[in-house]
C-alpha cells in the first residue's frame, strides 16, 4: 500500500483502552432510556486518565445527539451540554478528564470521523469506544479506535484521517468488583447449582474460542484469495499463537495428558460412589425414624385406650 501513517513514525500513542464496569452500566442505562427498540444510537463522553499509552476509562455521561438516517453528513451534538456537564464532573473529581467518546454503533459509521474531529478540541488524541449493548456473539462488547493521519506517497492526493483499532479490556477496582458481585447475585438464578454454572461458563468459553478461530480462518481465506491485503503484524501474532501450542506428537506429553485425565475421572467416579452411599444411608435413616415414630404413635394410642377402659 502506498500509505504512510504519520503516527507510526513518532510511535504508537495509544496501546490499550481499559473500560470500567460503571461505564458499561451507564451506557446501557442511557441506551434503554433513549434508543431502546429503535435504530438510533446514543453517544456520550468518556472520562478518565491516560498514562504511558494506556487509556483508563472510569466514568462517562450521555450527550444529546441527533443524526439524519438518510444523510449521515447531517448530525447535531450538543457540545454546550457537554461543556456544562464536564464542568460539574470536574468539581467532583478533578483527576478525571475527557479521554474520548463512545457510541452504541454497533459498528463504525460514515460520520464518526466528523464527530471524532469535534472531540479534538477537548483532548489531544481522543479514543472512540463502540459499545455493543445487544451483543450477539460471545466476548467483550467493546471495540476501541483512535484516528491517525494517512499521508499518501503521491503528493497530488490529500491526507485523510482513518480509524485504527486498539485492544480494549474490562477492568475494575476492588470497590467496583464488590458492586458487580452484588448485582450478579441479584441476577443469578439460585436454582442452578454451582457445577451447572461452571459447566455453562466452560461451554460459553469454548463457543467464544470457536468463534475466534472461525474469524481467523475467514481472514486467512480472504488474504489467500487476494481480497484483503497481507498484514504482517497479524501474521506475527498468529505465529506466536501456534508457537505456544503443545507438541502432541511427544509420547511423554500424551502419557501425561492420559494420566491427568484418568486421575480426574477417578475422582469423579469416587465422588459419585460416595454420593450414592450417602444418599442410601440417609434413606435408611429416614425409614428407621419413620418406623420409630409409628411405634411411638401405636404405643401412645394403646395407652390411651387402656386408660379409657379403666
Image: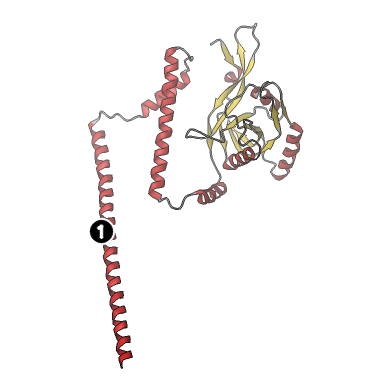
Q: State the image coordinates of residue 274 (x, y, percent, origin top left).
A: 27, 56
Q: Is residue 235 visible?
A: no
Q: Nearer the viewer, residue 136 or 273?
A: 136
Residue displayed at 68% across by 23% down: 114
Q: What residue is shown with label 1?
A: 277
User: In the visual, does 69 lie left or right of 272?
Assistant: right
Q: Nearer the viewer, residue 69 or 163?
A: 69
Residue displayed at 29% across by 56% down: 275
Residue displayed at 65% across by 6% down: 156
Q: State the image coordinates of residue 69 (x, y, percent, origin top left).
A: 66, 24
Measured along the vertical axis of the image, is residue 260 above or below residue 70? below
Q: Nearer the viewer, residue 25 or 236?
A: 25
User: In the visual, does 231 lie left or right of 115?
Assistant: left
Q: If the image is split into quadrants, where does the C terminus sit?
A: bottom left
Q: Given the current orientation, which residue lies at the most extreme bottom position?
A: 310
Residue displayed at 60% across by 39% down: 28
Way the structure is coloured: secondary structure
Measured along the vertical axis of the image, is residue 251 above or below residue 288? above
Measured along the vertical axis of the image, is residue 271 above or below residue 247? below
Q: State the image coordinates of residue 197 (x, y, percent, origin top left).
A: 41, 46
Determine the image quadrant of residue 242. Answer: top left
Q: Is residue 162 visible?
A: yes
Element under disc 1: helix
Within-10-Å neighbours for mark 1: few <14, some 14–19, many 20+: few
Determine the image quadrant of residue 61. Answer: top right
- Number of marks drawn: 1
Q: State the image coordinates of residue 109 (x, y, percent, origin top left).
A: 61, 24
Determine the image quadrant of residue 66. Answer: top right
User: In the visual, does 175 lie left or right of 212?
Assistant: right
Amino acid at each position: 500500500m502506498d500509505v504512510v501513517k504519520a503516527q507510526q513514525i513518532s510511535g504508537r500513542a495509544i496501546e490499550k483502552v481499559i473500560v470500567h464496569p460503571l461505564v458499561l452500566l451507564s451506557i446501557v442505562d442511557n441506551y434503554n432510556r433513549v434508543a431502546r427498540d429503535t435504530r438510533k444510537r446514543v453517544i456520550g463522553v468518556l472520562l478518565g486518565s491516560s498514562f504511558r499509552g494506556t487509556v483508563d476509562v472510569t466514568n462517562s455521561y450521555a450527550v444529546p445527539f441527533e443524526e439524519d438516517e438518510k444523510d449521515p453528513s447531517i448530525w447535531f451534538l450538543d457540545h454546550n451540554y457537554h461543556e456544562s456537564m464536564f464542568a460539574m464532573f470536574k468539581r467532583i473529581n478533578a483527576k478525571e478528564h475527557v479521554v474520548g467518546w463512545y457510541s452504541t454503533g454497533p459498528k463504525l459509521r460514515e460520520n464518526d470521523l466528523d464527530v471524532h474531529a469535534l472531540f479534538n478540541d477537548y483532548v489531544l488524541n481522543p479514543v472512540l469506544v463502540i459499545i455493543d449493548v445487544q451483543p450477539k456473539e460471545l466476548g467483550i462488547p467493546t471495540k476501541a479506535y483512535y484516528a491517525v493521519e494517512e499521508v499518501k506517497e503521491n503528493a497530488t492526493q490529500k491526507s485523510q484521517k482513518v480509524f485504527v483499532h486498539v485492544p480494549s479490556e474490562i477492568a475494575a477496582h476492588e470497590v467496583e468488583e464488590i458492586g458487580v458481585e452484588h448485582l450478579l447475585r441479584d441476577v443469578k438464578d439460585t436454582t442452578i447449582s454451582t457445577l451447572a454454572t461452571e459447566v455453562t461458563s466452560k461451554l460459553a468459553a469454548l463457543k467464544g474460542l470457536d468463534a475466534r478461530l472461525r474469524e481467523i480462518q475467514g481472514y486467512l481465506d480472504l488474504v489467500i484469495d487476494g481480497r484483503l491485503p497481507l498484514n504482517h503484524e497479524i501474521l506475527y501474532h498468529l505465529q506466536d499463537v501456534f508457537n505456544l501450542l503443545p507438541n502432541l506428537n511427544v509420547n511423554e506429553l500424551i502419557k501425561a495428558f492420559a494420566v491427568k485425565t484418568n486421575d480426574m475421572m477417578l475422582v469423579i467416579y469416587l465422588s459419585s460412589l460416595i454420593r450414592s452411599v450417602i444418599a442410601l444411608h440417609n434413606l435408611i435413616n429416614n425409614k428407621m425414624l419413620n418406623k420409630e415414630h409409628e411405634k411411638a404413635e401405636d404405643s401412645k394410642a394403646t395407652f390411651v385406650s387402656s386408660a379409657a377402659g379403666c
